[in-house]
């Protein structure tokens, strides 16, 4: 009882902190703003859910009544609440947490193949001495290890092999090494594709350690704008997008002896296109081995597609996972996730396992990190140490290794991850998974050609993968921050492959430059909607990348050299004409960083805002402001101090510089001269418009805008320098949907430019 009272004290402290939160202005990234100047998760949730429901046929009749009935029934079945094994514990639990989130236990996901190799593992580990010896011993404990010989035999016997194995069984890190050990790298490289850059980098790092070689030598990685390989490289991890680009230079992939298309179940756009391309070259390159690996069991589909290729199953080890649902829908999933994490941390002994929380993106993860730090600050030794480990696509390399470091005794790790931790990365030691049920996805409307980032409910398949992350090293628990009714009735079974919900302009341009003209008859595993293909052709035609026969033009050929979206590469190619390529590649680089440029420390918000406004002086628009940031930094000789003084993220800027250097190299390749013309803002904006004229909008009443080509109501994002200015005509970089459809990175344009630049696309009416 004393212990309970103690826990209650701590909980009260934590709660007090969280109430303080309401008064304190939380630290937020500027990008996370909505019109009220704060992040409105509740609104965001309801918008996402509404959209999602709208997108499905017909509304459900009063879903909540049904849900309540269902849940009453469930409560009758399972009175256990989270954290309680019996009635008494449940009472104790309520005593500690008055303001808790209530969970209802649902199904238990079965444990499979929990075998008795554990003793052998322990033995292997105990005799190992040096760190490297330990790594070698660890390799032998992975589920794939006992199948090493039969796998090698299968690869020898078959040209194409589909490999299926639970996440963490060793597919990505081990199979390329086995093939290397068996001599396949004597004839060429082994290439292994990953849908995500962080996965490619981190897996390559791990494998180089296991092989005791320097990263970038025998084992390397290649991601967009970053090539960490050398002449020595034999195992090459890369994003699927990079292998796609390699086809442009080497259409038969002659330098490879094995291609492993990993994480095939993710069905990213690039992976889907790769399927068609590798299937084709395998026909005339009998020496090329093709491995298609996947974490889920719908391998039949891959096998069918690859002319009935055999399926090699690696039996996994999985412990049972207890699934818990919230009693009622949680309006604010971010807060619910934080409260749940703290509930677990305070009530469960620290040594018993780490926590993995799935969030939708960098901004959300940073917000969660701040709040968690705030609520546990000053509790000192009252609670066990909580080590917060964020992981998302643009996390700087130095910080990526942190999530894999073993948790020190007496502490607990909470990993705040995007979908990357769903199957791409395996983090050992996770016992609790918190799943809010959302993911950030690109959504695309093939009718209007409009694309936007959208927080969307996940599929059942995703939810189960997420839950499975908690049962790798022992029995796990998964807390779903949605109701069982939501799970069974609202979530789709599977995620729709990206190819069916995205803008295809980029892919069409790549295929055209590979000489593949008949796109309608390309061997797609799941063909994209014909409408989307047509829209892509239309856009490429409007950008002058294709002629009216659908053939690649000179402009299109140049555009295809840039690993960028066609609108962005068109903007660069057009800068030749407007004699400002130097400025335009700086802007293109700044637009491609993918993470925030400015930051806003809680205690210095006014300073930070002023620093930001400096770059927007004269209402030049966001593109020119980005240029000013880059040029000013360059003038200080890339000073870190200058970044601090101006509340600018040094890392983002360094990345911009790297990207810019590469774009400069590509300019040379397509024979565009590097010309600087910093004073002529009109020339710069005309170049931008040459790429982005399909993204133009005209002001309507009360601060809203209407997109010109396919009328839709949009708003200027509050983080834009033009948010208060509201020019009559604007061109924008991208649309983001949070509480409203927002245009991000906006510049003013003159309507006559549209007629001048894209007469075939726009005819001016007023
Ligand atoms: P799969 O591809 O089947 O999901 P992996 O080969 O990625 O499995 O992982 C096998 C093991 O290697 C896992 O236990 C995982 O924790 C470990 N591992 C993978 N990448 C790293 C890394 N960067 N650092 C430390 N351990 C890693
Ligand atoms: Mg893997």
Image (spheres, rainbow, N blue to C red):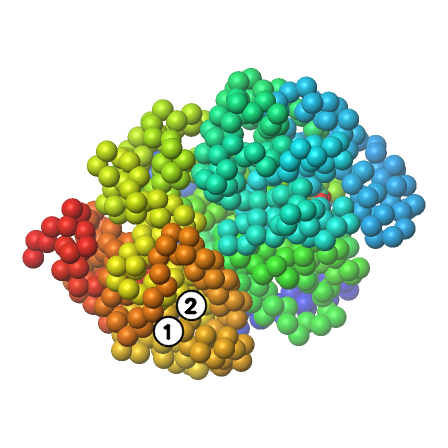
In depth, the one of 716 and 291 nearer the eye is 291
Crowd around label 2: few <14 · some 14–19 · many ≥20 (10 Å) = some
Which residue is under mark 1?
628
Residue at the extreme top of the image, as rendered: 308
Q: Indicate which disc residue 334 carries.
A: none
Residue 119 falls in image quadrant: top right
**Image coords of residue 659 (percent x, y):** 47, 60
Residue 39 to residue 602: above or below: above
**Image coords of residue 382 (percent x, y):** 73, 69
Residue 318 to residue 572: above or below: above
Mark 1 vs 2, N-terminal side: 2
Give the number of the mark in front: 1 or 2. Answer: 1
In depth, the one of 183 and 647 nearer the eye is 183
SS label for mark 1: helix
Which residue is under mark 2?
30
* Left/right of residue 300 with respect to residue 725 in the rendered view: right
Residue at the extreme left of the image, as rendered: 766
Tell me the distance, in whole angstroms, between the alpha carbons under discs 1 and 2: 18 Å
């Amino acid at each position: 009882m004393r212990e309970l009272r103690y826990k209650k004290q701590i909980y009260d402290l934590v709660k007090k902190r969280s109430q303080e939160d309401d008064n304190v202005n939380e630290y937020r990234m500027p990008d996370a703003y909505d019109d009220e100047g704060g992040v409105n998760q509740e609104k965001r949730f309801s918008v996402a859910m509404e959209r999602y429901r709208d997108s499905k046929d017909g509304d459900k009749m009063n879903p909540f009544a049904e849900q309540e009935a269902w849940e009453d029934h469930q409560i009758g079945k399972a009175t256990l609440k989270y954290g309680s094994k019996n009635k008494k514990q449940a009472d104790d639990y309520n005593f500690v947490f008055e303001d808790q989130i209530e969970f209802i236990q649902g199904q238990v996901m079965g444990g499979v193949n929990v075998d008795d190799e554990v003793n052998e593992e322990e033995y292997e580990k105990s005799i190992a001495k040096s760190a490297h010896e330990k790594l070698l011993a660890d390799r032998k404990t992975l589920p794939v290890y006992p199948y090493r010989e039969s796998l090698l035999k299968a690869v020898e016997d078959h040209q194409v092999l589909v490999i299926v194995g639970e996440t963490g069984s060793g597919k990505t890190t081990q199979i390329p090494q086995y093939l290397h050990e068996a001599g396949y790298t004597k004839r060429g490289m082994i290439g292994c594709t990953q849908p995500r850059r962080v996965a490619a980098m981190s897996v390559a790092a791990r494998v180089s350690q296991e092989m005791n070689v320097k990263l970038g030598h025998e084992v390397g990685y290649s991601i967009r704008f970053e090539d960490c390989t050398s002449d020595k490289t034999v195992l090459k991890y890369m994003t699927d997008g990079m292998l796609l680009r390699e086809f442009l230079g080497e259409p038969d992939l002659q330098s490879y002896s094995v291609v492993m298309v990993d994480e095939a179940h993710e069905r990213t756009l690039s992976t889907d296109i790769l399927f068609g391309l590798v299937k084709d070259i395998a026909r005339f390159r009998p020496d090329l081995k093709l491995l298609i690996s996947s974490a889920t069991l719908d391998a039949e589909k891959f096998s069918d597609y690859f002319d009935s290729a055999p399926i090699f199953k690696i039996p996994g080890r999985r412990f049972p996972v207890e699934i818990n649902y919230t009693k009622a829908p949680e309006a604010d999933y971010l807060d619910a996730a934080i409260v749940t994490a703290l509930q677990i941390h305070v009530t469960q002994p620290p040594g018993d396992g780490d926590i993995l929380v799935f969030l939708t993106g960098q901004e959300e993860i940073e917000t969660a990190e701040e709040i968690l730090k705030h609520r546990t600050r000053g509790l000192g030794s009252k609670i066990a140490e909580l080590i917060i480990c964020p992981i998302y696509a643009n996390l700087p390399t130095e910080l990526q290794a942190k999530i894999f470091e073993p948790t020190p005794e007496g502490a607990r790790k909470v990993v705040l991850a995007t979908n990357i931790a769903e199957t791409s990365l395996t983090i050992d030691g996770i016992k609790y998974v918190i799943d809010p049920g959302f993911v950030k996805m690109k959504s695309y409307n093939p009718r209007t050609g409009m694309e936007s980032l959208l927080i969307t409910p996940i599929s059942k398949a995703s939810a189960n993968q997420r839950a499975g992350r908690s049962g790798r090293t022992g029995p796990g628990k998964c807390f779903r921050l949605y109701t069982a009714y939501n799970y069974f009735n609202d979530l789709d079974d599977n995620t729709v492959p990206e190819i069916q919900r995205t803008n295809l302009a980029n892919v069409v341009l790549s295929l055209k430059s590979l000489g593949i003209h008949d796109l309608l008859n390309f061997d797609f595993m799941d063909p994209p909607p014909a409408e989307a293909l047509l829209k892509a052709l239309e856009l490429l035609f409007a950008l002058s990348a294709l002629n009216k026969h659908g053939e690649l033009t000179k402009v299109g050929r140049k555009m295809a050299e840039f690993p960028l979206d066609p609108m962005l590469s068109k903007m660069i190619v057009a800068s030749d004409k407007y004699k400002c390529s130097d400025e335009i590649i700086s802007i293109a680089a700044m637009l491609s960083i993918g993470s925030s440029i400015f930051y806003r420390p809680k205690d210095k918000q006014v300073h930070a805002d002023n620093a930001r406004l400096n770059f927007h002086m004269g209402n030049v628009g966001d593109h020119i402001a980005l240029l000013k940031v880059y040029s000013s930094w360059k003038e200080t000789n890339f000073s870190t101090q200058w970044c601090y003084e101006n509340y600018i993220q040094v890392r983002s800027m360094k990345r911009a510089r790297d990207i810019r250097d590469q774009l400069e190299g590509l300019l040379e390749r397509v024979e565009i001269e590097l010309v600087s013309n910093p004073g002529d803002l009109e020339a710069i904006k005309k170049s931008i418009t040459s790429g982005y004229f399909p993204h133009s909008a005209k002001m309507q009443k009360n601060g809203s805008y209407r997109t010109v080509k396919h009328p839709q109501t949009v708003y200027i994002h509050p983080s834009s320098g033009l948010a208060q200015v509201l020019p009559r005509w604007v061109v924008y970089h991208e649309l983001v949907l949070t509480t409203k459809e927002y245009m991000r990175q906006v510049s003013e344009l003159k309507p006559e430019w549209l007629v001048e630049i894209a007469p075939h696309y726009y005819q001016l009416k007023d």
